[in-house]
Image: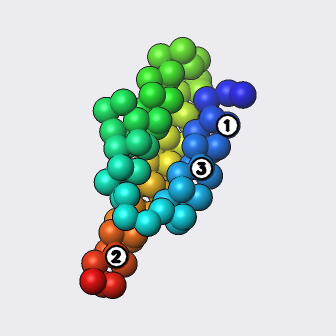
Amino acid sequence: MNLIEELQQLEKIAIENINASGNDIEKLRISFLGKKGQLTTLLKGMKDVSPEQKPKVGEVGNHVRQVITQLLAEKKHSKRLLH
């Protein structure tokens, strides 16, 4: 599996986990986006990507980060509305 496929797989997993989560929004944020998070760890692999592939991998990585960030923000906002 190449890095782009791994990033796309992580996006699917993140979406499933965030949608199924209860109150652990911050724990999920750290798990996916934190300093030692899954996305951060995958993106460290960019050093091994060919120069031609780096722009595409970066684009996919940024997209995944945006999707996760957006979902977490929506989940946090909807949680506030319920209280």
Amino acid marked by disc 2: Lys
Q: Secondary structure at mark 1?
A: helix
Left or right: 17 with respect to 37? right
Quadrant hosting residue 23: bottom left
Tag nearer the camera, 3 or 2: 2
Q: In the rendered image, which residue does mark 1 sit on?
A: 5
The image shows residue 56 at horizontal and vertical percentages of: 57, 36
Q: Is residue 43 visible?
A: no
Q: Which residue occupies 34% across, 76% down?
A: 79
Q: In the rendered image, which residue does mark 3 sit on?
A: 13
Q: Quadrant of the N terminus?
A: top right
- Vertical arrangement, residue 80 with respect to residue 38, above or below: below
Name the residue nearer the viewer: 56 or 48: 48
Q: Which residue occupies 33% across, 69% down?
A: 76
**Quick one: label 3, few (<14), some, or many (20+) residues within 10 Å?**
few
Residue 56 is marked as none
Left or right: 14 with respect to 81? right
Left or right: 49 with respect to 22? right
The image shows residue 65 at horizontal and vertical percentages of: 43, 48
User: Which of the marked residues, 1 or 3, is nearer the chain's N terminus?
Assistant: 1
Q: Which residue occupies 34% across, 44% down?
A: 30
Q: Secondary structure at mark 2?
A: helix
Mark-to-mark CA distance, 1 and 3: 12 Å
Q: In the rendered image, which residue does mark 2 sit on?
A: 79
The image shows residue 45 at horizontal and vertical percentages of: 50, 21
